[in-house]
Amino acid sequence: GLMPPSGGRFHVRLSLASTPARAARPKLSVSLVVDTSGSMSGHSIEQARAAARALVDRLEPSDELAIVAFSSEARVVLPVGPLGPRP
């Protein structure tokens, strides 16, 4: 039942349940396009490789990945497909 306001103390007992640490996200299909032209030599290409590794490390096994390299022309290095070994 309801209690009328009395201005006195009011005690509440709560029970909390945690949620999963990481909520599920939709499957991703990522196309990574990498500039391999001469301007990307040395430190620039090393940074691009590190960024690509960081991206792949964050993908889930259910995600898809494609890799395209370009300089004067684009070239598909890895067609879109699941992560991991492919037939």
Image (tube, rainbow, N blue to C red):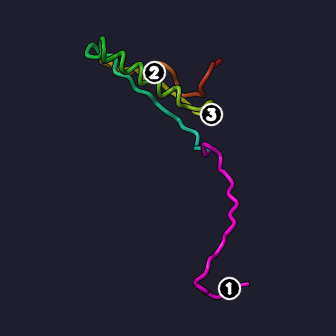
Q: Residues within 10 Å of mark 2 (few under 14, many from 20)?
A: few
Magenta region, main secondary structure: loop
**Mark 2 or 3, closer to the camera:** 3
Quarter of the rendering containing residue 8: bottom right
Disc ID at residue 33:
none
Disc 2 marks which residue? 76
User: What residue is rendered at 53% in x and 26% in y?
Assistant: 57
Q: Is residue 79 left or right of residue 32?
A: right
SS label for mark 2: strand
In front of the other: 51 or 75: 51
Q: Sequence order check: which comes first, mark 3 or mark 1?
A: 1
- Give the left or right position of residue 58, taking residue 70 as reference: right
Query: Do tag 2 and tag 3 residues touch (Cβ < 8 Å)?
Result: no
Q: Is residue 53 left or right of residue 41?
A: right
Mark 1 nearby-residue class (10 Å; few <14, some 14–19, many ≥20): few
Judged left or right of residue 69, residue 66 is: right
Q: Count the labels in the image.
A: 3
Residue wearing tag 3: 62
Read off the residue under disc 1: 3
